[in-house]
Amino acid sequence: MPVPVPARRRAVLTTPSILAALVLGLLAGALPWRAAQAFNFDSVVERAQALAAAPYHKPDANLPEALRNLKYDQYRDIRFRPDKAWWHNSTSAFELQFFHQGLYFTEPVKINEINLEGVQEIRFDPAAFDYGANKLDPDKLRGLGFAGFRVHYPVNKPAYKDEIITFLGASYFRALGKDQLYGASARALAIDTGLTSGEEFPRFVEYWIERPAAGAKELKIYALLDSPRVSGAYRFVIRPGDDTEVEVRARLYLRENVTLLGLAPMTSMFYFGENQRSPRPDFRPEVHDSDGLSIASGTGEWIWRPLVNPKRLLVTSFTLTNPRGFGLMQRDRHFYDYEDLEARYDLRPSIWIEPKGGWGGGQVVLVQIPTPDETNDNIVALWQPDPAPKPREPYEFEYRMLWQKANERRPPSSWVVQTRRGPGHVNTEPESGPARDKPAVYLTTEFEGPSLKNVDDSALEADVWADANGQILESRVERNTVNGRVRLVVRVRRTDDQKAVELRAFLRSGNEALSETWSYILPPD
């Protein structure tokens, strides 16, 4: 897309020198616009279309053995020198820093700048890196490229340029807003995630970054995606702030059919939380980057699915038409929820996706993978369009992504604050028989929000539903007199312990819904 020429104030011309200065200023202001006109989203589309028309070419790995055999801590010891940052000495508030190849990042990615002269490649220079304790010969590294890059911009303090977004590995990227720490990640595209056939990881092979003008509040990045079954053109418009916004436009070309095409995929970690205690002694009450999947459907219904760490792969989905938004959220925002001074899970961002235009029919797919610790990203959420695009035909979509902490998207009525789980035995049940053989599960869910503040407690009710594998033994609604929230208590028994149970519930007063829909999965035991 062309970059608009900034508006200028009118001035009274009194001398030829002032007129000449103004003409030169107008020409200088037009040059960036013309450079962006020469290279824009359509330029990347042409490359993606050409790639899709040809057989896939696997990128060549160019790593010398010394970099290929680095350990994790050794690779982390290679750091980009901040004084070498791209645009460091310019008038722009944005800066670029780059990641070195090594360890898992074996193929180089080409990075270009769009500037006054057109498009120029940013070439790798080993002098721009501090190699720490690593004994590497810089002369043997000169043929390398970059593994990725990160963008810096002041969001917390005016005098310090914070790292606000990183592009590194396959099509992964992650961003930060004010007072946030890295947690959940995003990807440009997911293919066959959670399927037994195996997952394909599309990769950004080239970037074009538009040089920002002085005072610019946003940064435009173009990227070319490629993998065995798909190629694509992407444009990212990054607007850092309290909630850093990433506007995404993409056009895909499939080489062949894909079973599961995942748009706007997000990846996060859930090890244990209030609804699932730690499998081993741990001083922390909860450990997760996200604690739930939130969905705003096209019908106005809001859905909250608390996350779990299942014993085996668990894939579920929500069929929708034109969703208004969905995201992996971190709703627990108090330090005492985690008590972790190092990880500070309370500062991890929520990721909210807002589709632009109608996305039509499809499913929000949630993939939950067993993890033995907190080092694995075991949660994936994505949009699967239905029907899937056909090979060789262009498929375009757009969305807005918000990395949030203080202003997280929530329903206007009321929302789930916590879900807790425990054994569901009661004293009246016999010591033997079905109650002993198939113990019940006790779930308490608390809601808060404006719709619950002035409602008569005697009018509060809950609609509770379980699938065919679950038997609702008890459900009741009560006011939590300590904190003012409304608590829903559900006791459920599974028919088949080897199968999951899906539960749904919402609060109402008469025919008026007062809360989002709580949608919970009890994984198989």
Image (spheres, rainbow, N blue to C red):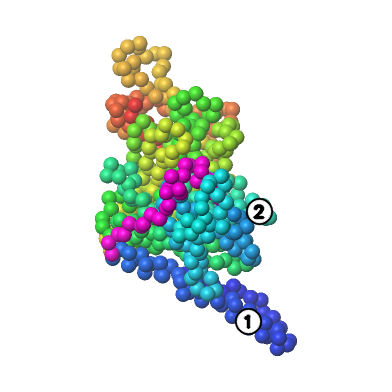
Indicate whether residue 349 is drawn in magenta.
Answer: no
**Rendered residue at 53%/46% (across/down):** 134
Comparing 357 with 233, the one in front is 233
Asked if 4 appears above or below 491 in the picture, the reply is below
* Quadrant of the image containing the C terminus: top left
**In this figure, which residue is indicated by the disc labeled 1?**
24
User: How many numbered tags mark residues here?
Assistant: 2
The picture places residue 43, in percent across and down from the top left corner, at 41, 70
Q: Which residues are magenta?
A: 54-79
Mark 1, Cα crowd under 10 Å, few <14 / some 14-19 / many 20+, is: few
Residue drawn where x is 40% and y is 18% of the image = 425
Residue 50 x/y as whole percent: 32, 67
The kind of secondary structure the magenta stretch mainly shows is loop
Question: Disc 1 marks which amino acid?
Answer: Leu
Q: Residue furthest right?
A: 14
Residue position marked by numbered label 2 in the rendering: 160
Query: Among all residues in the image, which is located at the extreme bottom?
Result: 16
Secondary element at image label 1 = helix
Can residue 210 be seen here? The reply is yes
* Drawn side of residue 75 relative to residue 394, left or right: right
Q: Amino acid at mark 2?
A: Tyr
Q: Are marks 2 and 1 in contact (CB under 8 Å)?
A: no
Displayed quadrant of residue 366: top left
Q: Position of residue 312 (x, y in %)?
A: 34, 33
Q: At 45% across and 49% down in the image, what residue appears?
A: 67
Provide residue 477's location: percent of width, then percent of height: 47, 29
- Residue 209 visible in image: no
Which comes sooner in the sequence, label 2 or label 1?
A: 1
Q: Which of 314 and 411 lies nearest the eye of the viewer?
A: 314
Look at the image and say whether residue 58 sits in the magenta stretch.
yes
Q: With respect to residue 373, does 357 lie above or below?
A: below
